Amino acid sequence: MIRLEEMKGLGKVRLQKLQEAGVHTLSDLLFTLPVRYQDTKTVIPIGEAEEGKEICISGFPKNAPRLNRFKGLTSVTLTLCDETGSVPVQWYNQPWLKDQFSKEEEITLYGSITRDKAGRRRMASPVIVKERGILPVYRSLGGIPPKTMRDFMHQAMEYLEECCPETLPDILRIQHHLCERNFALRQAHFPDSRENLAIALRRISFESVLLYQAAAASLRGERKEGIRIPADEKGCEEFWNSLPFRPTGAQQRVLLQIAQDMNAPYAMGRMVQGDVGCGKTALAFGAMYLASRQGFQSVFMAPTEILARQHLESAEKMLAPLGIRCGLLLGGMKAKERKEALEKIASGEWQAVIGTHALISEGVEYKNIGLVITDEQHRFGVRQRRMLARKAQKQPNELVMSATPIPRTLALVLYGDLDVSIVDELPPGRTPVKTRIVPEEKRDGLYTFIQSEAQQGRQCYIVCPLVEENEQIDAVSAQDMYAELCTGPLKNLRLGLTYGSQPAEEKAETLRKFAAGEIDVLVATTVIEVGVNVPSATVMVIENADRFGLSQLHQLRGRVGRRAQESWCFLMAHPNERLKTLCETNDGFVIAKKDLEMRGPGDFLGTRQHGDSMLPGMALGADVQLLEETTACLKKLRTTGYEEEWEMVQKSARAAYARVIDEVAMN
């Protein structure tokens, strides 16, 4: 078997790029799966082509290609026709394509048909098909062209038998109707048919998820002896009785679970999941109270400065009356302010420490940590959680909070090293947000409604999918929307603009003004999805709503309706089945389940876009049923009679996730 560096065409620069992407061996290369496939084998008649789906069409140009210039950009346009219909086609910044086509020559294109702002069908920036088949498309690795990656994969296939041995016991494969590993890898890279591709991806997905679950189970089994914090039902009741409201049954149940975990000889590792507004923050403070009454310090890490400040404000209302001293540590603090904070943390004067990533930075020393809490878990990795835990003298209790609803089946897969609690009740007094799909022709009426809300002292978000104009994407940009509203329909209101790449101080100041009621309408990107709590905001407008996943739309909707007054979420889009789901329910877990079923885990978790998943096969072929099947399989393997098979799966899991297991074990 050759080594990676001995492959033809793989020079030093490309080898380095692969290694930087985590590809060190032939096995690593073969498990760099395609992120998608181009089916250029099947040609769809233009008149029958569905919108929004990637397809292959063929036809002749109706007219000679035209070269257009606009704001420094170029576009080449033509109309492609076949016997069933026609569609305008456009390529951006590829002026040489003007001379590539003639009326007599048939053209085959691969792409998706969409509608422009005027509602007309078109195909933007399609691929000109030169090769027919079901072609793998790999994520970009240091600029290595897709065709070159395919060549490398062809070479690696010669050594498949040697470098990728079977990982699953035969009895397991037979029981779950799984093909052999080598067949799966061959078909995943170079499928003969859609049927074989589906069989291959199911096998790889099953293996990937099962081994991940087995690795997580081993981490759970190796949970370290930790700090025991005597906590009981009486302590929980003391905390709830100190508050001006009664907890929901779900809050009482989950705080009791936390108390039982803290009282155990092994360190707690628990995730609390719940919809926006279900009272997770109160649970976090309840846990901090239980720790402080036994003399332990608690640390609460939030993903943004504004959210950390809001948590401090809430902590001072809930915990300070109970005699618990609270403090804040942020990255942007001035030297004197930071020095004072570090002294109070190190001395133990602050029993409840709240902050951002600054909490895990060098030079921060704690007195007696017994509990660490991370808020919005999806913004932090295992490594950051462990870095915070390492600040303690002994393994502390860990509590993880998430307002991103994830179906329980998927949560158990993703967070296998944690116990999962779900807060499935909302406190009384919160009015469900009314959600409506708004077509473009009713935009003027929407602006009139926003004006009337502002006159009553209420505020509005307008969320756009892009920061700035992009000729290649038909979507509204935040900057253009802000400029248009400032001089147009909302010019008499106080408007603000914020987005992810905005300078940090400017962004913080804009969000502060909005929270303080100094801005009526905030035009933003999804930067406001987490970390903004403005109770007087009653209107959420989401432009190009069909570009977002249901779960993300639900998260954005959760920014309004934070008090009893009527609140609205308006989805600017053509009606479809996905968006109608959002109009029918406010239950985040129902929406997440629907989102998972419709898009698959890869899109649900963002792994298709980022190509950086702990579960590579899951991004392509897993579904809800497969997740349930692997969970049942793992349970069966750990029963009597499957000892040999369980040992083989554990061995495979250790090999597949050695880096993660070692990292967690070290921390």
Image (cartoon, helix red, strand yellow):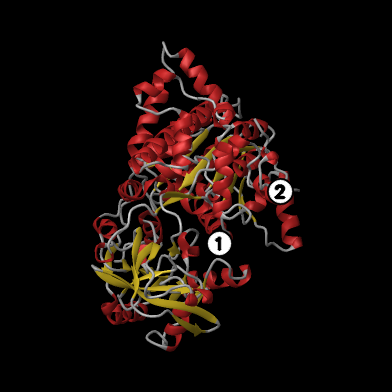
Image location (x, y in percent) of residue 513: 52, 73
Q: Quadrant of the C terminus?
A: top right
* Farthest top residue in view: 641
Q: Which residue is mark 2?
A: 11
Image location (x, y in percent) of residue 314: 50, 55
Instruction: Kindly indicate whether the residue at mark 2 contacts the one at mark 1 (C-beta within 8 angstroms).
Output: no
Is residue 640 toward the left or the right of residue 87 in the image?
right
Q: Is residue 122 above or below residue 561?
A: below
Quick one: SS at disc 1?
Answer: helix
Residue at 50% x, 64% y is 527
Is disc 1 surrounded by few (<14), some (14 to 19) or many (20+) residues within 10 Å? many
Whole-angstrom CA distance, mark 1 to mark 2, is: 47 Å
Is residue 317 toward the left or the right of residue 4 in the image?
left
Task: Choose between 95 and 596: the one closer to the eye.
Answer: 95
Is residue 609 toward the left or the right of residue 112 in the image?
right
* Farthest front residue in view: 104
Q: Is residue 579 above or below residue 64?
A: above
Image location (x, y in percent) of residue 520: 43, 77
Q: In terms of image quadrants, where is residue 371? A: top right
Q: Earlier in the sequence, mark 1 or mark 2?
A: 2
The mark closer to the camera, 1 or 2, is 2
Task: Choose between 657 and 531: the one closer to the eye.
Answer: 657
Q: Quadrant of the N terminus?
A: top right
Residue 46 in sight from this viewpoint: yes
The label on residue 306 is 1
